[in-house]
Image (cartoon, rainbow, N blue to C red):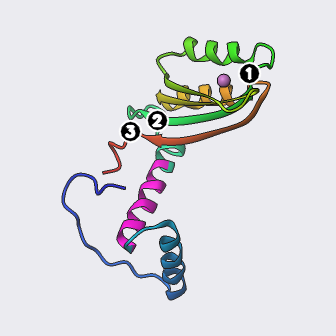
Amino acid sequence: MDEGRGSLIRFGISMPEQLVRDLDRWRRLRGYDSRSEAVRDLVREALVDYQWRDAPAESSTDVVGVVTIVYAHSKRNLSEHLTEAQHHRHTTAHAALHVHLSEEHCLEVIVLRGRREDVQSLADDLITATGVLHGKFVPTTTGEALV
Ligand code: NI
């Protein structure tokens, strides 16, 4: 991940030896070159999580999320329902990518952006639509609070 804006501040962190060993093993597997890089991403992850779960509902910070759904396009009314849901909330549903996975199956990747409640509610509607075989929601943020 990129280093963000502003200068880097160096500070020390004390951790139990085993935790540091585990961190090093994990970061190598993930491909992080340094502990700093790995810890920065862990902190950002925690802050995204905070923005989603604990930030005040009136927070003006937009949230962003990505929904992936796999479904059979022959399933009655499903394609129409999914398209309808996105048009109905077009200020939240920003973009969609449709991939024809096979004769039968489709993958759709939908980018949502807006108030947390709106994004979460549309994500839930898309994922829980009858006939969706696999749905996943990945919350993220605009990044403004994460630099
Ligand atoms: Ni398709």
Which tag, 2 or 1, sits closer to the chain's start? 2
Q: Are marks 3 and 2 in contact (CB under 8 Å)?
A: yes
Q: Amino acid at mark 1?
A: His
Q: Is residue 27 above or below residue 95?
A: below
Which tag, 3 or 2, sits closer to the chain's start? 2
Residue nearest the observer in this picture, 80 or 21:
80
Q: Is residue 72 left or right of residue 4?
A: right
Q: Nearer the viewer, mark 3 or mark 1?
A: 1
Q: Position of residue 73 (x, y in %)?
A: 74, 21
Residue nearest the observer in this picture, 68 or 52:
68
Q: Which residue is mark 2?
A: 64
Task: Kindly give the residue lying farthest to the left in the view shown.
Answer: 7
Q: Which residue is mark 1?
A: 73
The quarter of the displayed image where residue 110 is located: top right
Q: Amino acid at mark 2?
A: Val
Q: CB of residue at label 1: within 8 Å of ligand 1?
A: yes
Q: Is residue 55 magenta?
A: no
Query: Residue 81, can we see it?
Result: yes
Which tag, 3 or 1, sits closer to the chain's start? 1
> What segment carries the magenta color?
35-48
Q: Position of residue 4 (x, y in %)?
A: 27, 53
Residue nearest the observer in this picture, 28 or 12:
28
Ligand 1 quadrant assignment: top right
Q: Which residue is mark 3?
A: 142
The secondary structure making up most of the magenta span is helix
Q: Amino acid at mark 3?
A: Thr
Q: Mark 2, residues whose alpha carbon is within 10 Å: few (<14), some, or many (≥20)?
A: many
Q: Secondary structure at mark 3?
A: loop
